Image (tube, helix red, strand yellow):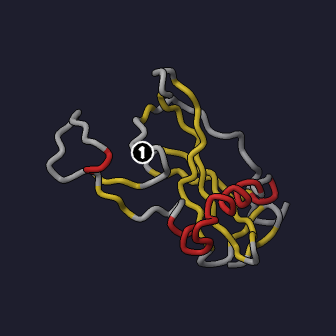
Amino acid sequence: MPAGAHPRPALHRERPRFKRLTAPTQRSVRPPKRLQAGQLLPLEQLERNPSTAVDPLREVYGGNWKEHGLRILGKLAESAFHGTLDQNGMKFDVYGVRHDAIGWYVKLTIDNVFDAKGAVTEQLFTISCHPLERPLRTNGGQVQP
C-alpha cells in the first residue's frame, strides 16, 4: 500500500438515517424559501441545482453519460480507494479512477431509505463523480487529472 493511502473500510452503517427521495433521478434540488417544515411540494415546483454527480458526466459524454458513469463506478476497487470523509456527521468514501484518459473523483455513501412499499432498504448514493481538479493519492498510487 503506498504511503499516505488508507485501507479500504467496510462501507459505513453506523446508525440508520432516513431520507425521503426527492426525485427518481439523481438531482440536487432546493425547495422554495417559504417552504414550511413538513410541507411537501410536487417535483415540478422544486428548483434544480447543478449536480456534482451527473452534470459533469453530461458535460463530458453528452447523451452517453449513464453508460460512462456506470463504467466509472465499475472501476471502483480497493486499489482506487482514497479515504473516508466525515462531513456533517455523515461518512463518505472517496475513490480516484481513470476512464477515457481522464482522472475521476468519485464520492459515495450508503444510506437507509424508504422503498416504494415503505420498507427500509440500503441504497448506494453517488454524491460526486467529476473530473479530478488535482492529483489524488489512492491505494494503487496517484491518479492524475
Percent coordinates x, y for residue 16 in the rendering? 50, 29
Specify the quadrant that holds the N terminus: bottom right
Of the residues shown, which amino acid type is indicated by label 1?
A: Ala
Q: Please give left or right for residue 2 compared with residue 44 in the image.
A: right
Specify the quadrant that holds the C terminus: bottom right
Residue occupied by mark 1: 23
Please tell me which residue lies in front, 81 or 61.
Answer: 61
Q: Please give left or right for residue 101 compared with residue 15 in the image.
A: right
Which quarter of the picture shows residue 10? top right
Q: Please give left or right for residue 44 compared with residue 26 in the image.
A: left
Residue 71's place in the image compared with 99, above or below, is above
Percent coordinates x, y for residue 39 in the rendering? 21, 36
Percent coordinates x, y for residue 107 in the rendering? 59, 56
Please tell me which residue lies in front, 124 or 4.
Answer: 124
Q: Please give left or right for residue 31 compared with residue 139 in the image.
A: left
Percent coordinates x, y for residue 75 in the rendering? 77, 58
10 Å neighbourhood of mark 1: few (<14), some, or many (≥20)?
few
Give the residue displayed 59% in from the left and 77% down from the top. Answer: 133
Residue 56's place in the image compared with 38, above or below, is below
Residue 69's place in the image compared with 108, above or below, is below
Q: In the image as oriented, which residue stretches furthest toward the right?
A: 1
